[in-house]
Image (tube, rainbow, N blue to C red):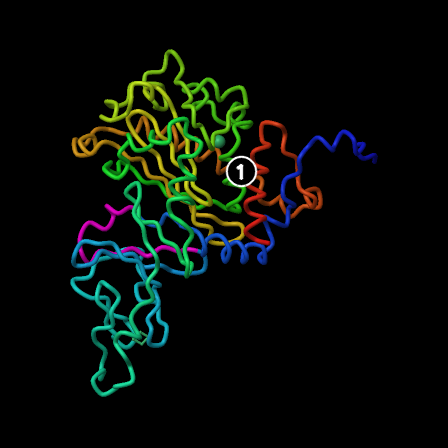
Amino acid sequence: MTSAPASSASSLRATLPGSAYTDPQVFLREQERIFESRWICAVRAADLPKPGAYRTVQIGRESVLVTRNRHGGLRAFLNVCRHRGARLCTAESGEVRRNLQCPYHAWTYDLDGRLVAAPNLSKMPDVGRAAYGLRAVALREWLGYAWVCLADAPPSFEETVIGAATERLGDPAAIERYDVAELALGRRITYDVRANWKLIVENFMECYHCATIHPELTEVLPEFADGLAAQYFVGHGALFGEEVKGFTVDGSAGFARLPKVAEAQDRRYYAVTVRPSVFVNLVPDHVILHRMYPLAVDRTVVECDWLYAPEVVASGADVSASVELFHRVNAQDFEACERTQPAMSSKAYRDGGVLVPSEHHIGGFHTWVRALLD
Ligand code: FES
Ligand code: FE
């Protein structure tokens, strides 16, 4: 067997080695340095409609409890009882009337995390209520989601979330016109993907695969068919095909353009991303937001929300033609990622693969990951 001469390989860029997608030690460092250190989009605020509503979400190795307090504000805590460490809330979501009570020995916390009661607490003067409150987690709201950060000193939200999301948009204010926080959830689909989270990010970043696996998407967005577009950052707004009436699976008309979306943004698809785990797609009548939660080196849960004008959802209008388009794209993408994952441990991929020119920007993602892990 002969190998390719070095000169022909030198213009090509390598991917990460296969072990980056299979090694539990690499995954552990990613959890520590990325998912437990950066701002992560956790919960749609509207999923916590009133005081006492809560959701639990896995961020890195931690279970995080997000709840709404008596004044209507969102709060996040580590989902761990300060007494002997029992998981406080075991359900994915629920609602309490006033307080959060540990099911083990009944220590009780209010919705701001303060320890307010425990059996025999008055006979235990050493157990300070202030000292044994729930461990708070930093929380910010943006686009109608609660974003949380497990770091003791979180990085700047403005720079690493808002700035990062908008820097590649031709007009950084463009995303504001979709009023994402005010939109209503039309559909949510959760995908349990048997692939490393970086394979999913890399797949999102390139459209070299679009012509091969996304027949419906390339019908609606013809420029994606040439394999050169980067699905990840479509800051200029990809134009709908001439015959296409809406961002739907069959090109049929969608709903009325969202009220503040500019004329120049009509009939265009924008994609923005917030590393490490959020992808936002903006089209004139709805917004699609993906959140990723890596659960293991080879398993990632992706939650995808389709958001519409509140009156569209309230009217009971059928949103399936638009949901179906990106649901198919997701299914096609995740099937490709799942086909790739088992080969990451093959000898053939020990030194990684190749980034062709239209994938070179994936190298920037690899540089970002490497810098955080070193
Ligand atoms: Fe929670 Fe004991 S572990 S009350
Ligand atoms: Fe794709």
What residue is at 28 percent from the left and 71 percent from the top? 103
Identify the magenta region. Answer: 44-59
In terms of image quadrants, where is residue 14?
Answer: top right
Q: Is residue 373 left or right of residue 310?
A: right
**Ligand 1, image quadrant it occupies:** bottom left
Pick out the residue farthest to the bottom: 123
Q: Label 1 crowding class (10 Å Cα cut-off): few <14, some 14-19, many 20+? A: some
In terms of image quadrants, where is residue 130?
Answer: bottom left
Residue 108 in the image: state x and y as whole percent.
23, 72
Residue 300 in the image: state x and y as whole percent.
47, 48
Q: Which residue is mark 1?
A: 202
356 or 246: which is nearer to us?
356
Task: Inspect the image, locate mark 1, and give the three-letter code of the amino acid beneath it.
Answer: Glu
What residue is at 53 percent from the left and 50 percent from the top? 298
Give the structural element (helix, strand or loop) at label 1. Answer: helix
What residue is at 55 percent from the left and 44 percent from the top? 368
Q: Examine the rendered structure and indicate whether residue 175 appears above or below residue 122.
A: above
Q: Examine the rendered structure and indicate whether residue 14 appears above or below residue 293.
A: above
Q: Is residue 3 left or right of residue 124?
A: right
Residue 47 inside the magenta-drawn segment: yes
150 or 303: which is nearer to us?
150
Residue 20 inside the magenta-drawn segment: no
* Quarter placement of the C terminus: bottom right
